[in-house]
Image (tube, coloured by chain):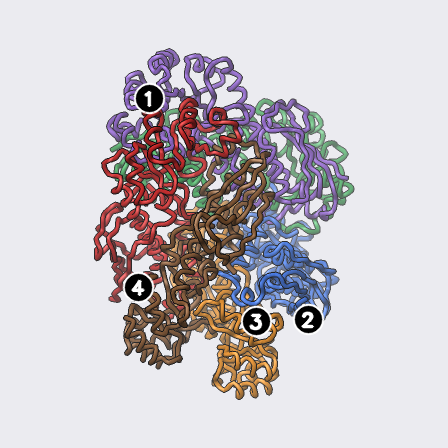
Chain colours: A brown, B red, C orange, D blue, E green, F purple
């Protein structure tokens, strides 16, 4: 469900960035006719994400390359698994290799980390969601990888949901007026979320009729009280420097969603390598 | 020294990605006339990198925003340091905030991690260098951050240096013929590097007159022997899943450069937040 | 609140389209130094919308042009009103004139038509909203003009809200399963709307817990019954070839929103002309 | 004959605008494998224009979609006519539907309105022509639709013909000097047209040897006199707020061309809908 | 009168092409604060063209650079003339230098060559015109340089004039039917030109009422006869491998225009160098 | 080995520039169904370069066009040789013709001129290399044509090699400090070249350990002495207004490379024409 529209351009940009005026090494050695097979191998356990993007980079450079995979996004691949087999002009496989891996390793990395958070809260009602702390120009891909890893998405961008923060509240003169001001201008189809920092603000938010309440850096015991107070009258999101260590404790407060910036801003790349055979 | 040419377009793309059809929250609450001050604060110790990019995002959206900083790229900022002060229309500061931070936190993260590697090899002759394992479309910025952190750059792209790998070698029928084939077509200004995996290949590489020899996943003791064998007749680079734990041992083999993919593909974002005051 | 991000590029495209290889007439007659004043005059009563876009076209071509206006978007301008005064190099004013007016007349036309619909439902609870039936590449501007005219916006695009139509329902095997399927993948911040065509479907939609119910081409008397049945448990939108003649009758059924495609796909341009004086 | 060059980019932009970060509804319900057939049906009588553009939107998103039509641009389609049948992945048909219709309805709308004007002047020598009052970024398509409707095109842009207006004339110090100034710089292949407002100016224009004389808001009886005076020595165009009511009277003055801004700036969209069947 | 609209983008592309990932030399040596003055000096006699483009490249990279010139486009500059003085950050002057000169030297080269042709036909009625044989993406600049050199422009592109060649004629079944076919679809503002190869075709062209007749590779004596035959009833253009040696002879046949492809496809660059002083 | 990545966009731009709003002539006469064959014929002796680019222009416009050639880049084509045969819709062949030839004639012209220089130095050790004096936006193609003609490439851009010129030297306070400053920041894979103007500077350059020494406008006898002095310790390049007349004398001084700006900035287009037959 990631955005296909626009992906071609992104890949073209990435190839231009890497190839520049030409791959001087490969072009000197290969005429273009030599065939080869490359196998993408998982060098550690991972959740696969972005196999179609991986494929598309090779095909963008050379539509005659053949790409075969038995993996689907979301699959758990053990260390040693062959993720895909790419065959065709070895020259073009080599030129595209690095860009293809740069996309794919990042997306698998995000899905893999997301799944760890999802596992950590298993059995609670909490769902793991992402943030807007994504890599510039790669947001749709990264949010897709979060979904692949079992997470959910917060808004896609500033136009895809209302999030009223402390600055909005103080500028508007309180939660109530902020919410009513917003309700008057936004598209019909967007929910309204308010960031709160204590129980008093929770009450004001509830009174204003918001759809979602975000606990901003609140302590677990306070979150628990707030969840009880809300009692299903709004969706509840916990936010603020969530780590793998702390996430279960937060989940057990009863919140509906826990947002984790690290999913996209600090996930290590998954280790994948391409082994080539010239045929 | 990062590429200014093209940066405006990259920032514009990133803003389009986040703002989309408009910031529905902020636009509903602020008319545009309200002034404010935002302070970017380091929430952990870090090496600053990308302060000009951070500034440029705000100014791209609103050229009347004022940006003040006492930090320079390369500075070591302690937790709590105010990295910059941004003042102007609070509405526009809020709209640009996330994109500006997404760039800045990534670059500071890379510089900070790079510096750790640099520190780890202090006292040896080894320099830390990056790879082409960068984020698609962000390479110039990321390689700049590596330099800011005290590292050096490997080639910018496939057109900025020759790197003859195993596939090139077997296709060409050996190191010697690969090197002579390449020498005949590449721009005058590029060096030739060959990847080797044992002492026999080191000798062949030396004989072919290459400029740089890369040890691919060789063991420290073997590297030591190879360095002695080369004896200054070529620049020496060590490569292959280098970690902070292993890097010193590798440095002590006497190599000139150690390349670390993790600098750019797995560095966690530096923790920076923006505190706003409406005036 | 229209999207500033991206507007510069849109205007540049529009100027390129019209100017092409150069304004052969104006460039032959004016050296570039001659000054002039142009007055934009309303040739009929209208609601002003897009005055900033109008201004921006001139300034895109020549940043030294001065643009003065006493009008604000949303103002009701009587026939004969001077909407803006543009002074500077007459050559550049002439080159930009047509493109500037093409944007401005369209936006004023939309706001003016929107206001007629808004007036027609005055005193009822119904609000007028737009659709995605906008001009390709001009959506943000057109949806802005709808707001200026007193209307509201439906979703900005396919990513800004869920609208489950008959095809989705039959593919999913009923409203209930369609809604639950969607709920599991969409961003947290989006509402779910379902299109219904009779009371039975209204009941199913209510049971599934949707946020918004859209009556698709239902008759007024049936809408009235459905509104009573829903009784505030969901937001209600009426849709389907709404005309100025029929809109009041629909509004009186008690629906919350009435969507009108004609606002953006069939509004006549407002009549505005530019009178120039060479000085 | 509309510009194919550039059309792909325009369609891509329009799809990006609508799809944004993804069609959240359709992607949640369809896996991508479900097939379907959609029939585009004329909901009112119309002149068909832009069937290839309509087709191209679907194929841009998914080259495997099949598009069948028995209609040709220029055909008169009665209410109820099936204009095209689109079959393939229902998911992609649904995603492309709105953008495809937004283009097609506009173009059919323009052709249909143009034909009404053409009918209205039937039997006279007058031809209906368009103006530069087109939608920003859609000019080539709109001018094509005018031709499809039986109209003719005035210049494509500021580089495609000379039109000397009152401001040019007063700046140049009269028609004679304006024309000779222009003749000295323009491409060999362009005609020169002058706008006149009375018989005296007609005479001056004739003396200067212009190719086309445009009557600017002149009264029918005066136009008749002017036509007699010109007597075939220049092509004659009538201009100025031409309506369907007034156009015949103007045509009967004997002018060669009548330009109508409303063809492109105020034509209502043709009513077309897409009926889908899942197979 | 060259196209300003679009020039910024062209310059940005050219700078990206040359600067790529950064000017590694200059960035290593200059911090950015060092000031300098560069003088552009004509190293041979030339006609100046494109001084504004030359300036714009420097200012695109650094708006604080100051650019002073006493030259105007069209001026005859003797060897040794200082064409412009550029002062500001020496670093940025050095980075922009090559791209700025690449544009400027080409445009001066074209204007200089054009003037030689213009001189060669002095005293005859013939004017020198260009063709569409221009450098891809630089047409507007190159056609501008032709005008600066005293030449005239043929059509800007395929949309800016009709030129019926032998293939069109044979496909249409003769000049007469080709001309009438074209007249029925082209914009009102374009002239019709036909290519002829003998007197018989000249007569057919005249009969069809074309505006311009082009002699395609006809011999001087035949051109003379054709000019007498035409006798002012159409504009006359001579075409076909015109050289500086042959052009006067052709001009003396009495033709109105002589088109010369070499003006833009084979003009040597004018020799200009930049002398820098660090201050 | 020219950059494929980016070529599609370049060709699209070039087609947009020429076709603009449409080929009014061809579209009026051909329906699109008429087939034809066009033969590209060399009208003078030449080295072929860019046959793939030539082909790609036709296929960009119409993927159904068939393109056949027996020529390879680098072939010596005698006057009269048929370089390629293009068959398909005559309409589209005609529309693409001029742009295709504009690219192809330029590239063949560059390869042809390069080969003359290469011939002139035959038997010496000198290789002919190009410069950065290329046409804006066409550098990769032009440098490719130089290689095809038997020449070599200097750096691709400012990021592809270090070239320390007089201004860098004086700013850095001498060759030694300039070189050491640069060595500290550049990518590992780039060589360092220094421009020198006398023997004293040659010695300083050698002492600093540079890879390449460029003689800037030195006299042949002085170059001879310098070559002896260097004695293989650095690569040697001669530069400065090299002409076909002077190049042999320079080559005989013993330099390794001679750079010639004229290859790309002043090569006349090769004469190629397209003969069409309608079938």
Residue holding disc 3 = C262
- Are tags 4 and 2 found on a single chain? no
Res D198 quadrant in image: bottom right
Q: Which residue is mark 4?
A: B90
* Mark 1, residue position: F196
Is label 3 or label 4 in front? Answer: 4
Question: Cβ–Cβ below 8 Å for labels 4 and 2?
Answer: no
Q: Quadrant of residue C81?
A: bottom left
Q: Tell which subunit mark 2 falls on.
A: D
Q: Callout 2 environment at 10 Å: few (<14), some (14 to 19), or many (20+)?
A: some
Determine whether the residue tagged by mark 3 lies in a helix, strand or loop.
Answer: helix
What chain does mark 4 sit on?
A: B
Mark 3, residues whose alpha carbon is within 10 Å: few (<14), some, or many (≥20)?
Answer: many
Residue E202 image point, x, y percent: 73, 36
Mark yes or no: residue E130 visible: no
Question: Rounded to the nearest whole Å, what is the CA distance between mark 1 and mark 3?
Answer: 73 Å
């Amino acid at each position: 469900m990631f955005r296909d529209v626009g992906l071609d351009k992104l890949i073209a940009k990435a190839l231009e960035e890497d190839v520049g005026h030409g791959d001087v090494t490969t072009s000197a050695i290969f005429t273009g006719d030599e065939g080869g097979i490359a196998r993408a191998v998982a060098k550690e356990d991972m959740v696969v994400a972005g196999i179609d993007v991986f494929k598309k980079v090779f095909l963008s450079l050379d539509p005659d390359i053949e790409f075969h995979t038995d993996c689907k996004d979301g699959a758990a691949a053990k260390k040693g698994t062959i993720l895909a087999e790419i065959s065709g002009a070895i020259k073009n496989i080599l030129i595209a290799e690095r860009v293809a891996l740069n996309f794919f390793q990042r997306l698998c990395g995000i899905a893999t980390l997301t799944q760890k958070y999802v596992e950590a809260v298993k059995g609670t009602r909490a769902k793991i969601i992402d943030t807007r702390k994504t890599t510039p120009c790669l947001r749709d891909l990264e949010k897709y990888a979060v979904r692949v890893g079992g997470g959910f998405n917060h808004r896609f961008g500033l136009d895809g949901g209302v999030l009223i923060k402390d600055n909005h509240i103080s500028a508007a003169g309180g939660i109530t007026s902020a919410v009513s001001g917003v309700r008057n201008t936004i598209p019909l189809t967007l929910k309204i979320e308010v960031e709160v920092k204590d129980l008093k603000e929770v009450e004001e938010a509830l009174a204003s009729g918001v759809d979602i309440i975000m606990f901003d850096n609140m302590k677990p015991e306070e979150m628990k009280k707030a969840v009880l107070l809300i009692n299903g009258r709004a969706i509840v999101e916990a936010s603020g420097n969530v780590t793998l260590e702390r996430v279960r404790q937060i989940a057990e407060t009863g919140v509906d969603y826990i947002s984790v910036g690290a999913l996209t801003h600090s996930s290590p790349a998954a280790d994948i390598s391409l082994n080539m055979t010239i045929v």
